[in-house]
Image: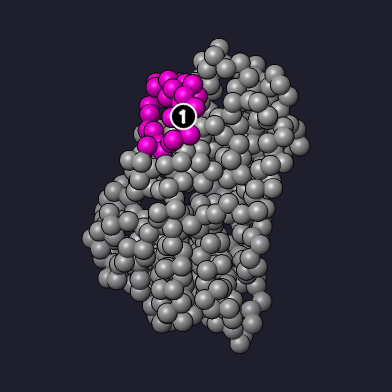
């Protein structure tokens, strides 16, 4: 009954869902495209003699984890086809840039008439949801068709768990319908069990399984030629309000380090123009990566207004600031700078990466500071090379000690084939 009411409400709200997409298209025109996919039109051609795994990754973070998982699945099951669905244009663009070839389209809205055509066309053998995405109708249809569903790299914050629990009549059957939950940490696992998931294992986080490959190193070496002899702070995945906090802190430091360069990377492409305007209003001399510009000596900010480059730019940093943490967004992935031995500073909202954040903090590789203390935290690390390098080395050790989750999760999924 709860799912029926949910579906009726969803049908009634469908015009508002697409009205919201239309409004978002004012900043990101891609939101006006490919609506037929969101309404359930299959667009990929599949090979009928190869088993297909369907992976759903909402946006950027999930897509990055899904890429690693796809590679590991192909190593264990070379003959599989992989369909990757996303929700956002940014996630879609990233998937289409993968070196690993996959089928791709948008995920339809969570209503049976939109979802059934994809099941009919693609005949998935396994359906993998990345991290937190559990949709009642999607799970129910997969159960009806005997398609096992796995929640991979599963994480569940206290806040999200409370939200799901408020609608337990709807969400509990959805979690109970999952064949497996491959949780990142014990705390995540406990919350999944409390929400009704029957088969939960702690597997670690795929996000630890990042490596510095030759291509990334070459790109980094190319970038370094433009910023030699400058102190560099990279502020990644920033959200509204955070740019002002970071710019205020870095401006204070310019008295001590006049050649300090801030690489500023807003999280969402639809905010690139907004942040550019903010820099102009502040009278800050800056250059834009999207225009192929490189920072001149007196330019204080390099605006990283491109997609998919942040992880490389972290390698330039003396210190990395991870956004989404000075507002209640729950932070973003601090392991990307740790890969390069770069110490990390975040704000106090880190619930999306709680276990990873705590592991880095306990090792001395990460500081959580309020906006009022950000300038001091930056200054303390900038003026103490030994402490900064020690913190960076600690981050690398944490990364190395926790790798292997991708292979473990891929092996568990492969067994369902």
Quarter-wise, where is residue 139 in the image?
Answer: bottom left
Q: Residue at x 44, y 73 (%)?
A: 411
Q: Which residues are magenta?
A: 364-391
Report the residue at 64% width, 82% height from top.
Answer: 47
Residue 70 image point, x, y percent: 54, 67
Q: Is residue 38 visible?
A: no
The residue that appears at 32% across and 56% down in the rendered structure is 185
In-image side of 320 versus 148 (left or right):
right
Locate residue 131: give its quadrant: bottom left
Residue 368 pos. (x, y %): 37, 33
Q: Secondary structure at mark 1?
A: helix
Classify mark 1: residues with Cα within 10 Å, few (<14), some (14-19) or many (20+).
few
Q: Nearer the viewer, residue 399 or 142?
A: 399
From the image, tell me which residue sits under label 1.
Answer: 386
Was residue 370 drawn as part of the magenta stretch in this picture?
yes
| Residue found at the far bottom of this picture | 49
Image x and y of residue 157, in percent? 33, 50
């Amino acid at each position: 009954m709860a799912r029926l009411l949910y579906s009726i409400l969803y049908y009634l709200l469908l015009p508002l869902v697409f009205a919201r997409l239309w409004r978002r298209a004012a900043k990101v025109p891609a939101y006006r495209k490919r609506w037929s996919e969101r309404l359930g039109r299959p667009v990929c051609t599949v090979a009928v003699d190869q088993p297909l795994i369907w992976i759903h990754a909402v946006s950027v973070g999930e897509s990055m984890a899904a890429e690693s998982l796809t590679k590991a699945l192909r190593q264990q099951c070379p003959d599989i086809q992989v369909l990757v669905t996303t929700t956002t244009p940014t996630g879609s663009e990233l998937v289409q840039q993968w070196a690993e070839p996959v089928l791709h389209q948008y995920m339809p809205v969570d209503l049976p008439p939109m979802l059934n055509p994809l099941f009919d066309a693609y005949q998935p053998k396994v359906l993998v949801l990345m991290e937190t995405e559990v949709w009642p109708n999607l799970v129910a249809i997969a159960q009806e068709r005997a398609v096992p569903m796995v929640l991979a790299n599963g994480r569940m914050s206290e806040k999200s768990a409370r939200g799901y629990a408020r609608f337990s009549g709807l969400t509990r059957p959805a979690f109970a319908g999952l064949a497996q939950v491959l949780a990142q940490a014990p705390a995540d696992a406990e919350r999944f069990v409390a929400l009704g998931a029957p088969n939960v294992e702690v597997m670690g986080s795929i996000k630890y399984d990042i490596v510095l490959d030759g291509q990334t190193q070459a790109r980094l070496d190319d970038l370094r030629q433009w910023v030699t002899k400058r102190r560099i702070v990279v502020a990644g995945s920033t959200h509204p309000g955070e740019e002002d906090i970071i710019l205020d802190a870095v401006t204070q430091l310019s008295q001590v380090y006049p050649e300090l360069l801030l690489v500023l990377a807003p999280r969402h492409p639809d905010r690139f123009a907004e942040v550019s305007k903010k820099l102009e209003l502040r009278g800050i001399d800056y250059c834009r990566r999207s225009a192929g510009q490189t920072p001149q000596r007196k330019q204080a900010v390099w605006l990283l207004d491109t997609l998919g480059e942040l992880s490389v730019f972290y390698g330039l940093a003396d210190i990395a600031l991870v956004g989404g943490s000075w507002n209640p967004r729950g932070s973003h992935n601090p392991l990307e700078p740790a890969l390069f031995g770069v110490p990390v500073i975040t704000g106090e909202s880190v619930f999306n990466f709680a276990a990873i954040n705590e592991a880095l903090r306990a090792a001395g590789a990460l500081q959580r500071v309020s906006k009022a203390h950000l300038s001091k935290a930056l200054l303390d690390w900038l003026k103490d090379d030994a402490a900064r390098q020690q913190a960076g080395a600690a981050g690398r050790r944490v990364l190395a000690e926790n790798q292997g989750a991708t292979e473990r999760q891929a092996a568990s999924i492969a067994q369902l084939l």
